[in-house]
Structure formats: structure tokens, C-alpha cells
Image (spheres, helix red, strand yellow):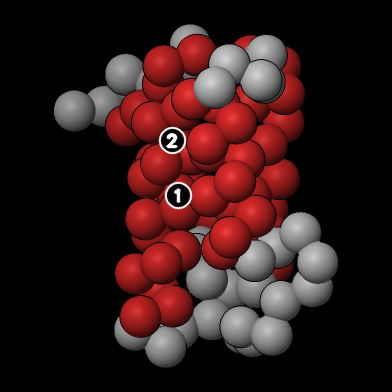
Amino acid sequence: MDHRGMRAAVDATIAAIEAARAAGEGHSWNLAAGTDLAHFHDMRARMDQGDLDEGKIGRWLGWIQGAAVAHRWLTLDQCKAINRHNGGLEP
């Protein structure tokens, strides 16, 4: 997945987490440090500012999706679909 695809996947992941939260889904919304929505948006803003290289964005995408699955906000299949879609592997 290229830089643009990773950024789009991060956006789609954050949007899916916010939708799950609005629907009351997931294991817990009592979040540990680093897993709150404000931090997710801060990291996304840092991408826009050019503060993160492609490797860091890839690690961040993996981390945010791992946190989403661990908290049961998203399923692994949902994360895979987000990545396939934004990586240009499916329409």
C-alpha cells in the first residue's frame, strides 16, 4: 500500500471506530492512554503536517487497527477490507 493508501486506510479506520462508538459497540470505551480518539486524530493531523514518514504511518495503521480489534470496535475482517479497499486491491 502506498503512502496515500495508508493515509486513506487510517481515515477509514478512524471513521469506522467512531461509527462503532456511536452505535455503542465494542468491549470498552474506557480507554487506556494512547487509545483515545483525540490521540487518533492528533496522529492523523501529524500525517497532514508531514511529521510522519511512510514507515511510521504503516506502523501507526497497524497499531490503530490492532487496538480496534482488541477492544472489539472492529473485526479483523473489517480491518482487512479497509486495507484491501484503500490499497487498490478491490473497488
The residue lying toward the viewer, choosing from 29 and 73, is 29
Q: Residue at x 50, y 14 (%)?
A: 3
Question: Where the C terminus falls, by quadrant?
Answer: top left
At mark 1, the secondary structure is: helix
The residue located at (41%, 21%) in the rendering is 5
Disc marking residue 90: none
Amino acid at the residue labelled 2: Ala
> What residue lies at 79% left-to-right and 73% top-to-bottom?
32
Whether tag 1 and tag 2 are in contact, CB under 8 A, the answer is: yes
- Please give left or right for residue 56 compared with residue 88 in the image: right
In this image, 46 relative to 23: left or right? right
Decide if residue 74 is in sight here: yes
Q: Secondary structure at mark 2?
A: helix
Q: Residues within 10 Å of mark 2 (few under 14, many from 20)?
A: many
| Label 1, residues with CA under 10 Å away: few <14, some 14-19, many ≥20 | many
Classify residue 88 by image quadrant.
Answer: top left
Residue 35: x and y in percent read 70, 63
Kind of residue indicated by mark 1: Thr
Name the residue that disc number 1 marks. 13
Asked if 56 appears above or below 37 in the picture, the reply is above
